[in-house]
Image: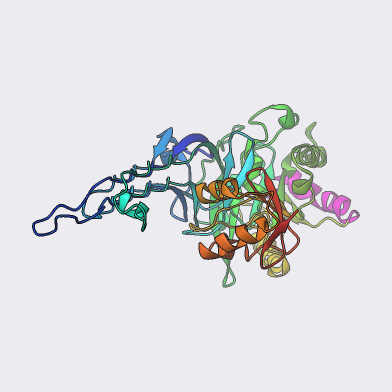
Amino acid sequence: MFIDQVVLKVRAGRGGDGAISFLREKYIPRGGPAGGNGGKGGDVIVIASSQKKTLYDVALQKVYEASNGQPGKGKNQFGKDGVDAILVVPVGTQIFDQKDNRIIADLTEDKQEVIIARGGRGGRGNSSFATSTNQSPRIAEKGEAGEMREIRLELKLIADVGISGFPNAGKSTLLSVVSAAKPRIADYPFTTLHPNLGVVNHRDQQFVMVDVPGIIEGASHGAGLGLEFLRHIERTRLILHCVDLSQYYSENNPYDDFLTLRREFEAYSSSLAAKPFFVVATKLDLPPAAQAFHEFKTTFEQQGIPVFGISSITKEGIHQLLDAIIEYLKNAPEIYSEDIPSLSKNTVLNPTSPRHYRFSTPFLDRLVTEIDWNAENACAILNQKLADANFLKYFSAIQPGSIIEIGTWHFIWSGKRLESA
C-alpha cells in the first residue's frame, strides 16, 4: 500500500537518576561517596533509506518511544544509556513539527539521519558533588525528561522527470515502455491511484521518471483525486504534459486539456508552474492523432513550447523524446533539496528562515537560564561555556550575521562567537 503522509508522536527516553552510595569494603572504613551517574535517555532517530518506497511500515505504529536511561549504581557504576528508537523512511521524506508546521528536516540522501527527539541527560550521582568542604554529599540528581513532540512525515518522491496529464492520456503506458516499471494500465479513468517510479536507461544515460495520477479540471478544489499527489513532481527537473491527441476532433480538445493542466498547476504552486516542461502528444498510432499532429505541433511551436509526438504501442517518437530529455538534463540544475539544511545525528539546528536559526537542547536551555544577563560579561561567559562543551562547532556552518535563537534569547553569530542582538 502506498502511503505518503503520516502523523506520529515521538518520545525520547528519560535520563537515569544518579545514585547516592558510599563505598563500604573491607579495610576501607571511610571509602567516601561512590554513587554513579544515570545513563542518557535514548533518542528518536529518523533514517532515510533508498530501499523504502512508502511510509506504510512507519504508519503501522502511531507512537515511537526510546527507552529510558538506567539509574546509576554504587561503586561509581554508571547506568546504561537508553536504546534509540529508529524510524526508517524513504529518501525524499520531509519531517514537520505538527504543532507549528515548521520543517525539521528534509532527507534527500540515502542513509541520511536526523535526531527528532533527544533523550534526557542522566542525573549525576553523589560522587560528582564531593568537594573539599563536603566530602560525603548525600545528594544526587534526577534524570532529565526526554523530548516529546508530534511530527508529520511527508514523502516527496525524488525523480528527474515527472509525467502529468488528464486520466487516460497515456502516462502510465509511456512509463511502462521506457522503463521496467509495471504500473496498472486499463482503459478507464483513474487507473493510476498512486505515483509510480521508473528508471530509464537510454544511450548509456540513466534518469528517474515518476508518473502521478491523472488531473482533471477543478482538481485544485478537490475534484477527482485532487492535487495531493503533485508534491511528488515538485522535486523534478522537467515535467512532461501528456495529452491524448486522439481526441483532437472531439469535444475534448487536447489544447484545452493542456491549458486546464497549466491552470491547475498554477493553483497548486507557483514554483511548480514555473518548472520547464515538454508537451507530449500521445496515441499517434490512432488515425485522428496522426492527422492532427502537425497542426497541433505548430500551435505550440509558435509559443516556443517543445512538442513531441509518440505512440507507446508502435514506439514511434519514443527515442526522439528520450534524446531530448537526456540533452535537457545534462545542463539542468539539481533541485532535489529545497534549500533546507541537511541535519546529521549530531546536529541540533532547526532553521526557521534563511538567516534565523532556533537551537533547542536541554543543555542550551539550561545554560541560558543559569547566566546572569545583567552582568557585563554575560555573553563572554556564555561563549566560554559553549567552548568548554565543544558546542561552538555546531554554529560553524552558519553565515556570519545570522540570528541565533536559544529559548527566549536572541544572539548574532559573528563567525566565531555569539554576540548580543
Q: Is residue 302 magenta?
A: yes
Instruction: Pick the residue in front: 267 or 254.
Output: 267
Image: 57 above or below 39: above
Q: Nearer the viewer, residue 273 or 352?
A: 352
Image quadrant occupied by the N terminus: top left
Q: Is residue 296 visible?
A: yes
What residue is rendered at 71% in x and 59% in y? 419
Q: Provide the residue span drawn in magenta.
A: 282-303
Q: Is residue 243 left or right of residue 368?
A: right
> Viewer-proximal residue, 296 or 336?
336
* Residue 76 % position (x, y): 25, 55
Residue furthest bottom in the image:
204
- The image position of residue 101, as x and y in percent, is 64, 37
Residue 170 seen in the figure: no
In the rendering, at what x and y percent does residue 43 appear? 42, 48
- Principal secondary structure, stretch drawn in magenta: helix
